[in-house]
Amino acid sequence: MASIGFIGLGRMGHAMSRNLVEAGHEVWVYDINPEAVARIAGLGGHAASSAADAASNRQFVVTMLPNGPDVEDILFGSPGVANAMAKATLFIDMSTIAPEATDRIATRLSRIGIAMLDAPVGGTSEVAERGQLLILAGGASRDVEAAAVIFDAVGRQTIHCGDNGTGTRTKIVNNFMSTALNTLTAETLAFAEAAGLDVARTVEVLAGTTAGKGFVTGAYQRKVLGGDISAEFGLGLASKDLNLALSYAAGLNVPLSVGAAAAQIYSMSKAEGFGGNDWSAVLETLRRKSALEPVHYPD
Amino acid sequence: MASIGFIGLGRMGHAMSRNLVEAGHEVWVYDINPEAVARIAGLGGHAASSAADAASNRQFVVTMLPNGPDVEDILFGSPGVANAMAKATLFIDMSTIAPEATDRIATRLSRIGIAMLDAPVGGTSEVAERGQLLILAGGASRDVEAAAVIFDAVGRQTIHCGDNGTGTRTKIVNNFMSTALNTLTAETLAFAEAAGLDVARTVEVLAGTTAGKGFVTGAYQRKVLGGDISAEFGLGLASKDLNLALSYAAGLNVPLSVGAAAAQIYSMSKAEGFGGNDWSAVLETLRRKSALEPVHYPD
Amino acid sequence: MASIGFIGLGRMGHAMSRNLVEAGHEVWVYDINPEAVARIAGLGGHAASSAADAASNRQFVVTMLPNGPDVEDILFGSPGVANAMAKATLFIDMSTIAPEATDRIATRLSRIGIAMLDAPVGGTSEVAERGQLLILAGGASRDVEAAAVIFDAVGRQTIHCGDNGTGTRTKIVNNFMSTALNTLTAETLAFAEAAGLDVARTVEVLAGTTAGKGFVTGAYQRKVLGGDISAEFGLGLASKDLNLALSYAAGLNVPLSVGAAAAQIYSMSKAEGFGGNDWSAVLETLRRKSALEPVHYPD
Amino acid sequence: MASIGFIGLGRMGHAMSRNLVEAGHEVWVYDINPEAVARIAGLGGHAASSAADAASNRQFVVTMLPNGPDVEDILFGSPGVANAMAKATLFIDMSTIAPEATDRIATRLSRIGIAMLDAPVGGTSEVAERGQLLILAGGASRDVEAAAVIFDAVGRQTIHCGDNGTGTRTKIVNNFMSTALNTLTAETLAFAEAAGLDVARTVEVLAGTTAGKGFVTGAYQRKVLGGDISAEFGLGLASKDLNLALSYAAGLNVPLSVGAAAAQIYSMSKAEGFGGNDWSAVLETLRRKSALEPVHYPD
């Protein structure tokens, strides 16, 4: 049984702290909303009178707060959680915040000898209710191992992403892709409907191709990530198909903002000479635009 | 055994006509490149002396050409395939061309009493070699059924998308999504690398979330396509995560053109009042921007 | 007095042919709409019975048609203007069409010994009524000089852009900028209004700064186009200001699609090392993205 | 002669405080860099030992700092400028910061009875040296009038934008437009060069059209801002020209990210039914996308 301070009882924090209580841990909870505290206390948790009270003399202190400034205030404001924690406490921030904030927090806690994990989660509040979250942890291996008692109670899988800051960064990169993909999916289905297609049948088609199945476990693994950009599907052909779609959509007055942005990247990639390579070679173009060291692919 | 005229022996056409020959059909092939014709003749096909020669007195005539103008020239130029075909011939265009061209072709052939299918394919040339293409067919049901002898020899699955023109449109919509998703995937991985993350581990994470698994068979089916936009994951939260990513990337000098375009769609969706709804409600925003009739969702 | 065939009497063509008639020229006009022909005939022009009739035995033949295919049909269809023209005729296409079409037309006419100018115009129909168009001419100097009798009757200024094709290209580049700038202007004013600003006062401010006055006759001439990218206003500062605006607008739910696209170009430019240079150095970044030979600026 | 505290002696602050000294004012300057302080002291200013020291017992306190957090720290950190100022002091922040920060500062100062202006400036450091800045002031009229002794010494023109916060917002909106226009200008000139045009001649053309002269003092005043969206230049034609440019550029492998984003706005505008209206009607489309109350234009 672990003793845990848990700060932040919004929709996600409520579900997570409840799962910790139900797993048999001693959980001291705090939120600015007293009703949220009372709800967990009613389920067997302990009501703390302040964030500092929740954090004093615990093995673990977990924060689940809306934004980076909230976490920094709770820790370093007055009276702050940072000073309230014992040296042996492991601090775990499970909020989704800016990487710069995570870095500042890790640095300041390290100065006063307190270890930390940044461990934001993947999944909706409904997934949190079922204790099935994905946990993306950044920090020392031994701390990730120690935190397993907590992560196992709230999640289905923990991925150790690397040092402090990598949990936050991985979450941000992951959600960048999912939130942008959401918009691309919507553009595609609005386009299909405006083109007079049956949307359900179009979804059936998409589900069976790269459009719906994605690249990360397929084409990218086989090609560019494996150091091979010989054409499986030519980048120039992909560019041609995309421009064909944009021209057709323009005639239908269907805005395809995401797709139009993508088309310009293909132009850059062709201008760099990748037109005859695999379409996954756009990664190399974007790597270079981000000042990453060019990869040299075999001919 | 069917008698087939096959016009256009590029990488894809070569593989497809070879599979038709190997399936035992009588195949008359034509291409402007005599060597391409000779290759198929050497495998048991018949060398035609012109496109019109390939098309005369066949049950089926198949075209697999680079662009719409090529198909229109072959059909209606002089001497044209349209006039060479018998009334009972079924014309099947398997090229990927502009929908406007497909519509013109269908109209002109219909005037002279010849039935047609637009049936572009999904899959790379390597997939074509193995006879495993996806066929997206537009036209009358009886014609799609009749063409099964051909489609079965070159593909693994045929989807009947609707009337003439829907095969072409479905292909264009599908490739719109896949080619744009390719760029989004590349942006995500360049971002991960520039953020100092281990790319292989990031791919592992993406593969387990909506980012890598996509929306079409998951969230969209459960939510917006099923008429329900109550929040599973809130659109406003998705927008916040995306803006957090863009701010962080701006500091790293990582361009995220596709993601930045997506972020503006979220702003429009929030301005329309969907901030508290499910993130899949961006579809409704984009439908309206495309002048599609608004859907009214239950509260 | 010149003898002129004029084909295409839409809003622009009407105004232009009327000005030619009023300048005292002998003008044979043709349009598919007989009423349009009758209107000019009523003002002193001559009604031609066909495009070929309008074009026979004239010193000049002018076309003012909606699209490239229209011009190619009129010229090379049957009976075509190309064959109707005498060898001494100067053909002048004043339509705005795709450069590829202009190039094809110039090549085909040159084969049959007929000289041509591509000379699209700048200005609205109201400007055309007043004979104040801007004429962007591509072709041989002696042909541009010969055409002055026409250009002077319909325009206020003729710019000789270079060889055949450069008139069309200059028009397209010019209208690219003006049509995109229109959208940027609209984004800016919608942003101002959503930010609670008085729009009229904001316009007054914009009118006095680079925002409203533009770069082409100011900063670009002094800096990047003059080979100097030392910072007058730093590119990194410009990028910071733009990102500040995007963050603020995101909070207001104001979509800034054009601005968000621009911000990614700044990121690319900073990734290339231009952050400390003048903001006009984005030109060098975009030149390189377009595979143009890099310019080397003095330190 | 006014007594002025001036905090922040970067490139801009140096030039501005020097102009204040040269205009005969008593200026107490502070910066974290002692050399910057010494330079102004050497010109007749007074070296303050801290920000609070600079701010005590002055008629005016001016800040010119890099970011919003810098201004908030100087004011409300310890020892803070806010407490050091006398009640009669007018605080003037001339930095360019986020509007949210300006609003927080105005609110907190107002609580302790201190009046403030947000008065960011337009112009480069070279313009600042010559005392020719544009000053965008937000606050009470009497405070803007009182500050004239300062503004006249550093600037050529002061525009009173409205209440507190409007100076900052106007600056951000203005720089949004200028920084994005910079990128659009660069796209246009890279496009011209890639199209084989003479760049200098293209600049000459642009300078004479709306592309180079802009909309804010021309078309917008005559049309949409005056309540008239009848077509002077049709929105549908503008959209056609822009799509023509994008298609041509795609064939040249020239990326036009800004222009491609703009094209989607035209599609939205046409889907809303504005295709036959003036091209300035895109403003109405973007206003609606930003949840601003629709304007009803006369037929």
Image (tube, coloured by chain):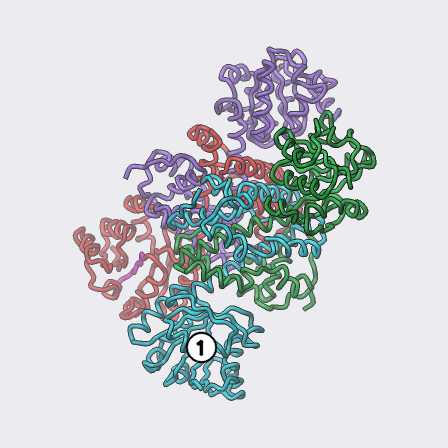
Chain colours: A green, B cyan, C red, D purple
- The secondary structure that most of the magenta stretch takes on is loop
In the image, B280: left or right of B206? left
* For residue D230, above or below residue A258: above
Residue marked by disc 1: B148
Where's residue C4, x and y in %?
26, 58
Q: Residue at x 51, y 52 (%)?
A: B222
Image coords of residue D72 (percent x, y): 65, 25
Q: Amino acid at mark 1?
A: Ala
Taking depth in this image into account, of A236 and C124 the one nearest to the observer is A236
Magenta span of residues = C56-65
Work out whether B85 lies above or below B211: below
Quadrant assignment, res B91: bottom left
Report the front residue among D214 and C255.
Answer: C255
Which quadrant holds residue A50?
top right
Q: Is residue B54 visible?
A: yes
Residue nearest the observer in this picture, A18 or D229: A18
Asked whether the viewer can see residue C268, the reply is no
Question: In the rendered image, which quarter contains the N terminus of chain B?
Answer: bottom left
Quarter of the figure with the C terminus of chain B = top left
